[in-house]
Image (cartoon, rainbow, N blue to C red):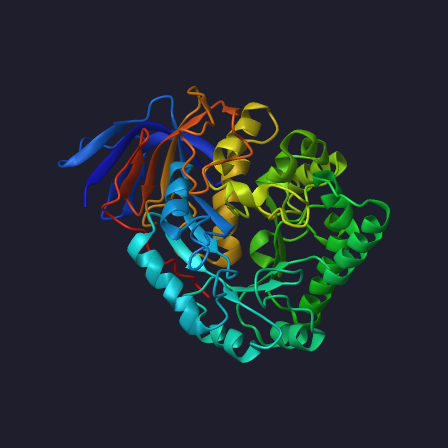
Amino acid sequence: MQKYLLKNIQIVNEGQISVGDVLLSAGRIEKIAPKIDNIQGAREINGENKYLLPGAIDDQVHFREPGLTHKGSIYTEAKAGVAGGVTSFMEMPNTNPPALTQALLEEKYTIAANTSLANYSFFMGTSNDNMEEALKTNDKKKDICGIKIFMGSSTGNMLVDNHLSLDRLFRESEVLIATHCEVEKMIHDNYSRLKKVKEILEPSDHPIIRNAEVCFESSLTAIQFAKKYNSRLHILHISTARELQLFSNMLPLEKKRITAEVCVHHLHFTADDYKTLGYQIKCNPAIKARENRDALWEALLDNRLDIIATDHAPHAWEEKTGPYEKAHSGLPLVQHSLPLMLYYYKQGKISLEKIVEKMSHAVATCFQVSNRGYIREGYYADLVIVDMEKPNTVSKENILYKCGWSPLEGFTFPATITHTFVNGHLAFENGRFDESEKGMRMQFSR
């Protein structure tokens, strides 16, 4: 494997920025020092005026394979992620068929091993009646990122609303449990009430139907189960100010048993954006009123929220058109999550160190990812080089999602990702890909 010597680059890692050299060899970070002399056989990359970040680890994506590949595939969406600085992903089980057996889960790993440019892991799926199969994940805790529970509706038979099933899962699981928290009955009741007074629904009705109470009651239930059994719970895509009272910043992350994630679209969009973007930003949980976004930012910066992710969920363009009942929920984001956070860095909203903490370090800590998420000697060389003075605009020509669209089309980012290394392999360089090496199955130190 090619050696690389990154020279005179600004290294953003573990709460500080320092200028130095970094040697990559045999897929790992071999040496970090203020100055490293020329290494025979190493390709030098001039990092002057550029920044080196650990690759982002996205703990929530929907790459649509198998069965829904008209929307996206592991190959296309992982490639888009790499272009955006995401070097590792954890993918959700609501595919077709859903990953409700260990055999179906392993089939996804096989697809990724053959096609994914990024590193990968996949969540085991749950339903009301697959507890025996789901709990077999206990025997694979070093190989699988966790178990996913949809406590709101999802594709196929994946809604878990039976409290006996939930109780058993929280009681017996030895791996992280990740939850989508919305109360299905409340959603249906809200929809029915609204339809009685409004025959044709609009995009802006989505946060009324999937309101704050829908999220809060479900998150509270999940937390009550987790506290009952001291389970390791991670609540995905927090979207409301009200839920934030459920989370604490009193413990360091490595000691928390209950953690929470916020997604980039809930940090960026508000309900006001339905006027211009319509169903493009319809997602579950819904993008809500501005005060929720403001509260999410505050909680992210004070560490009540632990991770920034995407919930990347591509749909074909025709699937995102109305009417309300037919417009699919979800939006594609994995190519643009890190650039969007760099925009907020330039706006003075968040520091580079905090971006790296929330998109790399904290994910590695939360999930106990082995040898990734930090710029450390001996760790895998999952690295991103950023040019902070090179703007780029999202356009149809540079969108890499298979669905071919983005709600950020026309938006200009102030910075550009110029290089992405995955396990020391230069997978992306100045708009060009080298697909000769694939990503690796992530391992977990549990």
Q: Is residue 342 left or right of residue 32?
A: right
Whole-percent x, y for residue 371 in the image: 38, 53
Q: From where the camera sits, is residue 15 visible? A: no
Q: Is residue 128 left or right of residue 403?
A: right
Quadrant of the image occupied by residue 268: top right
Quadrant of the image occupied by residue 87: top left
Q: Is residue 234 above or below residue 292?
A: below
Q: Is residue 435 above or below residue 352?
A: below
Q: From where the camera sits, is residue 4 visible? A: yes
In this view of the protein, which residue sits in the foreground, 94 or 91? Answer: 94
Q: Is residue 190 left or right of residue 169?
A: right
Furthest residue toward left: 40
Whole-percent x, y for residue 420 in the image: 34, 37
Whole-percent x, y for residue 38 in the image: 18, 31
Query: Residue at left 70%, top 30%?
Result: 275
Whole-percent x, y for residue 304 in the image: 67, 47
Query: Residue at left 82%, top 44%?
Result: 198
Furthest residue toward bottom: 132
Quadrant of the image occupied by residue 218: bottom right
Q: Is residue 96 above or below residue 170?
A: above
Q: Is residue 423 above or below residue 391?
A: below
Query: Residue at left 36%, top 44%?
Result: 382
Query: Residue at left 39%, top 62%?
Result: 108
In this view of the protein, which residue sits in the foreground, 230 or 421? Answer: 421
Furthest residue toward right: 197
Q: Is residue 404 left or right of residue 201?
A: left
